[in-house]
Image (cartoon, rainbow, N blue to C red):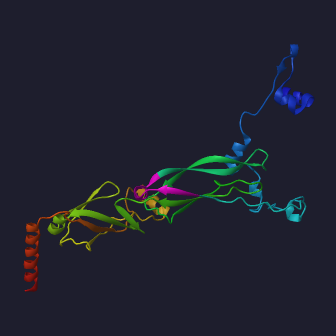
């Protein structure tokens, strides 16, 4: 009641700033310590609590007597805020294993008057799931620009994949070029490949390796991103059911830089003998 009396006598200014007291002192004074627009943003997803009552183009949804639905305001249609598009750079390792990355971007945010917009820097955490690719587009509703009379636009995140030294991706398949010596190629020794998740994949070759040799290892390519509901169900059951593409092994044979004449002749003789045996 005391504050009501201050307001009746001194108005809003006296209520907020205080009223004259004994010996020239100022007593009282009240200000709401919070930020009402932050509350609106948490509850409504926008600092404009009336955005839900407006059409996407800013017109009065319910057509109140003085609303623009009946031409009462005769105002121009407010422009819709544009979506914000950003590109998130990811390594092939991150796209294979999944990770959490932070996106920093600029967006327009309405000020307390609900009309004026100011540019602000914001961060959003983006979950990169195993198998995401440059075709993946992630949309975050209400995280884009704000404008008077509209719901906030969306933040649209596209993915860019950086090059990898050893692996090349083709859709859900991986292509790995393995360097071996000429001796290893002739002996057809087992091949060890370091996978993107740290495992060592060992595969045998039952033929002499040539520059044209390609070994296919099924199920060792990129994880295939599936329906989120299916992924969640698999995790609850403690199962790892994410399918994968294939791994294609190609070979880069390292030939000797130098070889003596005697060794050259020995190799030629062996190749000739081998050719004659095959012709028999």
Q: Is residue 45 visible?
A: no
| Quarter of the rendering containing residue 198 | bottom left
Image quadrant in which the N terminus is located = top right
In the image shown, does 42 or 58 lie closer to the viewer? Answer: 58
| Quarter of the rendering containing residue 60 | bottom right
Q: Residue furthest top?
A: 23
Residue drawn where x is 32% and y is 58% of the image: 195
Q: Is residue 5 above or below residue 166?
A: above
Q: Is residue 227 visible?
A: yes
Q: How many numbered discs, if any?
A: 0
In the image shown, does 109 or 262 lie closer to the viewer? Answer: 262
In the image shown, does 136 or 231 lie closer to the viewer? Answer: 136
Image quadrant in which the C terminus is located = bottom left
Can you give x and y, in whole percent of width and height, for residue 87 in the image? 55, 58
Q: Is residue 117 above or below residue 265?
A: above
Which residues fall within the magenta stretch?
86-99
Residue 95 belongs to magenta span = yes
Report whether 189 appears left or right of 232.
left
Report whether 167 appears left or right of 158.
left
Report whether 171 appears left or right of 207.
right
Can you give x and y, in whole percent of width and height, for residue 93 in the image? 40, 56
Report whether 202 appears left or right of 57.
left
Can you give x and y, in whole percent of width and height, for residue 114 in the image? 78, 49
Residue 165 belongs to magenta span = no
Q: Residue furthest front?
A: 261
Q: Is residue 4 above or below residue 120?
A: above
Q: Residue furthest bottom?
A: 280
Can you give x and y, in whole percent of width and height, for residue 36 in the image? 73, 41
Q: Residue furthest right?
A: 9
């Amino acid at each position: 009641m005391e504050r009501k009396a201050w307001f009746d006598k001194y108005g809003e200014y006296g209520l907020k700033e205080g009223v004259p007291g004994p010996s020239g002192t100022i007593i009282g004074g009240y200000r709401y310590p919070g930020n009402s627009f932050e509350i609106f943003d948490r509850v409504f997803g926008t600092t404009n609590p009336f955005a839900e009552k407006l059409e996407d183009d800013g017109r009065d949804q319910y057509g109140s007597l003085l609303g623009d639905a009946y031409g009462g305001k005769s105002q121009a249609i407010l422009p819709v805020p544009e979506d914000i598009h950003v590109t998130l750079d990811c390594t092939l390792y991150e796209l294979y294993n999944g990770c959490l990355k932070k996106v920093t971007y600029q967006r327009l945010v309405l000020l307390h008057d609900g009309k004026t917009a100011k540019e602000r820097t914001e961060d959003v955490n983006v979950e990169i799931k195993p198998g995401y690719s440059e075709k993946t587009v992630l949309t975050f509703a209400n995280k884009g620009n704000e404008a008077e009379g509209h719901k906030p636009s969306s933040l649209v995140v596209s993915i860019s994949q950086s090059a990898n030294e050893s692996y090349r991706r083709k859709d859900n398949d991986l292509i790995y070029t393995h360097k071996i010596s000429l001796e290893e190629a002739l002996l057809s020794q087992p091949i060890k490949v370091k996978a993107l998740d740290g495992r060592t994949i060992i595969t045998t070759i039952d033929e002499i390796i040539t520059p044209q040799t390609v070994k296919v290892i099924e199920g060792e390519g990129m994880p295939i991103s599936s329906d989120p509901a299916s992924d969640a169900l698999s995790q609850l059951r403690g199962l790892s059911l994410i399918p994968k593409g294939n791994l294609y092994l190609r070979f880069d044979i390292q030939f000797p830089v130098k070889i003596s004449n005697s060794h050259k002749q020995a190799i030629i003789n062996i190749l000739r003998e081998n050719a004659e045996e095959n012709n028999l």
